[in-house]
């Protein structure tokens, strides 16, 4: 058989052309996949706010963002479920204490290239475990404040004793808050000198916890608050005028302003035993499950994080969403010009305690809740409940440390 070299050359060229045609769509698909990220977050700043920011990011960067808005009440559970299915999003905006799920979510550690933002050491600590950073703080605050309706309040009480006296002149409870949610109970422990953890271990067996239980129950017994109150007491019931006062965090301010406008007043929490009330504060942070910062989307994720931490977006967070910027310089500008409600909001933040983001906190919260219920139901005294909390928190933490299941 005689081979024609021209035919061989032609056939070879055809093969190369065909391979190029086959590979091109695969390369394009791969590139498109690297330019698309999945982002989960709770509502921030009202309906459509985050969607608008992310749409602008896509327009300017060409990086598509598949968005999922998940209620803060459901977000942690949803992440744990998706982790078991190996179907986690690329990036999540969440409370900083979620980094205690670092092992379950396989969180990326944050490289030095993404730790150059002007963020305080205290805020970086909210996203660190044993000096390893697992999240980028994006929003500051998350502390509790006293809200009030200016049309219904002539003078704001500044102590819990004054609230008890005011209740005697009223026909029903006067302050609405989520009474059985432990984040609202924790300030009583903190103000009385305690904490939920100490040196990365639960610290629930203390006089501060026992006294806080008694003090907290006394407010319900005095009728200052309805012990059956849930989130609606500090929102819908407060807006409707059922309660003159509410206790809530800065996450609620955007809606509160929409409902009450200039009738909304903000004050620091009432003092307790002559001491300023100290709420926990923390940050909302960007976390990266399934070690996504090491994967093919790392460049897109880096660009998204840089965009959300930019001065323009940080300033918009305050102006449009009423959330405190995480960037030190932007927060300093806000503090220098703040007055009225803004000043009270920042003053409360200054009194707050940065919430530890260590695994022990997860079990401290759960044990605190169980002991709280036993005390409120009259099944245990305050000191016994405090002791029970500590035993259970240590037991649950030990199980995890040994690789056991909760």
Image (cartoon, helix red, strand yellow):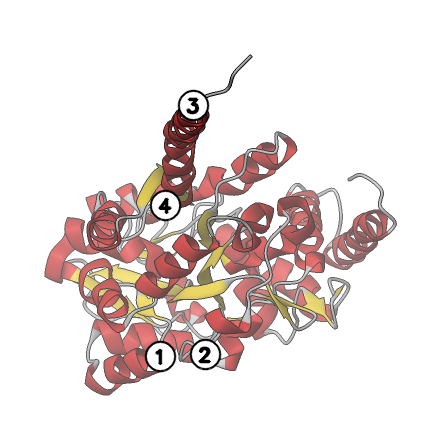
Quote the CA–CA distance across marks 1 and 4: 42 Å
Location of mark 4 (residue):
35
Quarter of the picture holding the N terminus = top right
Quarter of the picture holding the C terminus = top right
Q: Earlier in the sequence, mark 3 or mark 1?
A: 3
**Badge 1: residue crowd in 10 Å (few <14, some 14–19, many ≥20):** some
Q: Please state which of residues 33 and 206 is positioned toward the viewer in this rendering.
A: 33
Give the structural element (helix, strand or loop) at label 4: loop
**Badge 4: residue crowd in 10 Å (few <14, some 14–19, many ≥20):** many
Question: In front of the other: label 2 or label 3?
Answer: 3
Q: Does the CB distance between marks 3 and 4 fall below 8 Å?
A: no
Give the structural element (helix, strand or loop) at label 3: helix
Evaluate whether residue 217 shows in this view. no
Location of mark 2 (residue):
351
Q: Earlier in the sequence, mark 2 or mark 4?
A: 4
Query: Which residue is situated farthest in the right direction here?
Result: 402
- Residue shown at 35% from the left, 38% from the top: 66
Q: Relative to 26, does residue 161 appear above or below in the rendering?
A: below
**Badge 3: residue crowd in 10 Å (few <14, some 14–19, many ≥20):** few
Location of mark 1 (residue):
347
Q: Does the CB distance between marks 1 and 2 fall below 8 Å?
A: yes
Quote the CA–CA distance across marks 3 and 4: 36 Å
Q: Relative to 314, does residue 274 appear above or below in the rendering?
A: below
Give the structural element (helix, strand or loop) at label 2: helix
Location of mark 3 (residue):
11
Q: Relative to 326, does residue 151 appear above or below in the rendering?
A: above
């Amino acid at each position: 058989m005689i081979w024609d070299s021209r035919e061989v050359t032609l056939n070879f060229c055809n093969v190369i052309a065909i391979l190029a045609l086959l590979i091109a769509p695969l390369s394009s698909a791969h590139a498109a996949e690297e330019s698309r990220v999945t982002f989960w977050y709770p509502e921030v700043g009202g309906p459509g706010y985050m969607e608008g920011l992310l749409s602008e990011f896509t327009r300017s960067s060409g990086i598509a963002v598949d968005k999922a808005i998940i209620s803060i009440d459901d977000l942690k559970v949803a992440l744990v479920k998706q982790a078991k299915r190996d179907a986690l999003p690329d990036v999540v905006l969440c409370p900083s204490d979620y980094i205690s799920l670092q092992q379950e979510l396989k969180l990326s550690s944050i490289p030095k290239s993404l730790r150059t933002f002007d963020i305080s050491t205290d805020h970086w600590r909210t996203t660190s475990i044993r000096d390893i950073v697992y999240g980028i703080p994006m929003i500051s605050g998350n502390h509790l404040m006293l809200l009030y309706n200016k049309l219904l309040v002539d003078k704001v009480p500044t102590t819990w004793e004054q609230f008890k006296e005011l209740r005697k002149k009223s026909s029903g409870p006067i302050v609405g808050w989520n009474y059985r949610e432990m984040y609202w109970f924790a300030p009583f422990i903190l103000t009385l000198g305690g904490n939920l953890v100490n040196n990365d271990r639960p610290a629930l067996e203390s006089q501060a916890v026992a006294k806080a239980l008694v003090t907290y129950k006394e407010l319900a017994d005095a009728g200052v608050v309805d012990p059956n109150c849930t989130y609606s007491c500090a929102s819908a019931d407060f807006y409707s005028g059922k309660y003159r006062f509410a206790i809530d965090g800065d996450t609620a301010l955007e809606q509160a302003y929409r409902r009450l406008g200039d009738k909304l007043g903000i004050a620091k929490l009432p003092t307790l035993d002559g001491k300023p009330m100290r709420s926990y504060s923390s940050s909302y942070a960007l976390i990266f499950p399934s070690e996504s910062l090491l994967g093919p989307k790392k460049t897109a994720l880096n660009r998204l994080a840089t965009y959300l931490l930019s001065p323009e977006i940080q300033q918009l967070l305050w102006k449009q969403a009423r959330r405190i910027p995480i960037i030190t310089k932007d927060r300093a500008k806000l503090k220098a010009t703040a007055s009225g409600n803004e000043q009270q909001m920042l003053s409360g933040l200054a009194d707050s305690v940065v919430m530890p983001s260590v695994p022990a906190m997860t079990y401290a919260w759960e044990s605190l809740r169980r002991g709280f219920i036993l005390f409120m139901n009259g099944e245990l005294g305050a000191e016994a409940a405090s002791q029970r909390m500590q035993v259970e928190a240590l037991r649950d933490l030990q199980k995890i440390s040994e690789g056991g299941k909760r």
